[in-house]
Image (tube, rainbow, N blue to C red):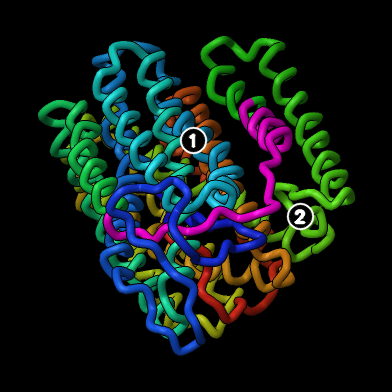
Amino acid sequence: MTALDTRPAQSPTDPTPASPDPVGTAGATTLRPPASSAAAPYRWRWPALAVILAGSVMELLDATVTNIAGPTMRADLGGGTSLIQWLGAAYILAMTAGLLTGGRLGDIVGRRRMFLIGVAGFTVGSLLCALAFSPETIIAARIVQGLFGAAMIPQGMGLMKEMFPPKELATAMGLFGPVMGLSAVGGPILAGALTAVDWRLIFLINLPIGAGAALAAVRFLPASRPGKGTRLDLPGAVLASAGVVLLVFPLVQGREHGWPAWSFAMMAASVAVFALFAAHQRRKAARGGDPLVAPSLFGKPAFVSGMLTGAIYFAAFAGFLLIVGLYTQLGLHYSPLKAALTGVPSSLGMIAGMGVAQAARRHGRKVLLAGALVMGLGVLAMIVVSGPGVSPWQLAPALAVAGLGSGLIMTPYFGIVMAAVDPSETGSASGTLSALQQVGGALGLALLGTVYFGTGSVQVALGVAAGMIAATFVAGLMLPRQTRDETPPHTTH
């Protein structure tokens, strides 16, 4: 299971719902601009919301299944221990690269069109995963999934803003929490059950879901007029993606090759590429263009500290879940289904933490800091109880506490960081935070996976995770005290 992602529509200029889609999709319903503020809302908005939820659930499940199926897939396909890390990291890296452009492409060519492209590509990528016959083919197929998932997911929030009147939008957004929470609990269990039969089934199950979502999208999603004057910053997207790959690739592969000079050279090069990206974004903004990231955001200390807090937390969270999956299967020799059931207390704890955090929303930063303390205690408890022959019941309390703390951190995080952002910067800021979430997750998989395989000790790996959570607490002290009183961007992985 992964964090509940925030995947925004990232749009500095939301296109106005309008007349027929230029694609001319047969059977599509067109959302017309209201004649007045009292005009009737879009007729098919609730079925359309179900379509968006279906896409989000499908993406969330595939973002998490390899934590359970990874060891079995490696045993079947061959490859080194780094393959298990790459099953998640390749997907997340591709998702990150796509998120930087997916929302903007929705503004440029139309959100329904991009959603359909994303669903179709994600379904094809799932088929390619099921047909994989080597480590290289499964990693390539995971990249395809990540790229098209990033085309699909960012369209949800923009479509919802078009379809729902303000008084219903909060209700519609509120449905994401329960649905994603149930997916977070049920997803690993389903993955464990299917992996026990054949790991390829965890990808084949997406074929009927994807086909149904695509047909329903044609029928129920509204057609929007593509935005005018908005252009894709392709050089910026290439630079940002290159910087992430240069940083993560050597972290995953360096250990297996004895940390050669090229691994350190790549990490150093990533710093230079990120500096080029920042300079490019400043030049583009100065010329009146459409940068992927508004440079003004980096002049706000609260936003910068929010990025630091998020990067550390999401790395710790993703890495912690990977360690639990590896430890239960490779260390304790649990079956995939037993390992999945072992992780259920963590999922339930996270759902409980989200509920508590939502009720205590007015306390803002205090909730996040309390969450870091609680999650840290849970990870420390895991260090104490972990060892040979441990039963799932012995691990359950520590996992539940760690999950509870994670839910307390995640729920207020985006609102707190967005409190430091001007309204004109909201689209860029939410997109930046979403990409950062994915980058942090990829780094966590690479770093903690490397520590686990390099030392062979779950206690050492969990100790590093505990240190990262402590760093999250310290960085969180610099955040604004209160959340912005608005619904955070699209919540789903």
Whether the magenta-drawn stretch holds residue 394 is answered as: no
Residue denoted by label 2: 294
Question: Which of the 4 quarters of the picture holds residue 477?
Answer: bottom right
Residue placed under numbered mark 1 in the picture: 445
Residue at 58% across / 78% down in the picture?
364
Q: Amino acid at mark 1?
A: Leu
| Residue 238 - label | none
Q: Give the residue displayed 32% in from the left and 55% down from the top.
A: 28
Distance Cα–Cα, label 1 vs label 2: 28 Å
Return the residue nearer the eye: 351 or 489.
489
Judge whether 373 appears above or below 202 on screen: below
Q: Secondary structure at mark 2?
A: loop
Q: Horizontally, is 196 left or right of 462 in the view?
A: left
| Above-or-below relation of 478 to 356 | above
In-image side of 210 versus 420 (left or right): left
Q: Which residues are magenta?
A: 219-245
Residue 223 in the image, given as x and y percentages of width and height? 42, 58
Q: Amino acid at mark 2?
A: Ala
Residue 316 visible = yes
> Does the magenta segment cover residue 224?
yes
Decide: is 178 above or below 273. below
Res 208 → quadrant = top left
Percent x, y of residue 156: 43, 58
Residue drawn 48% across the image and 59% down it: 224
Give residue 313's position: percent from left, percent from top: 56, 53
Q: Secondary structure at mark 1?
A: helix
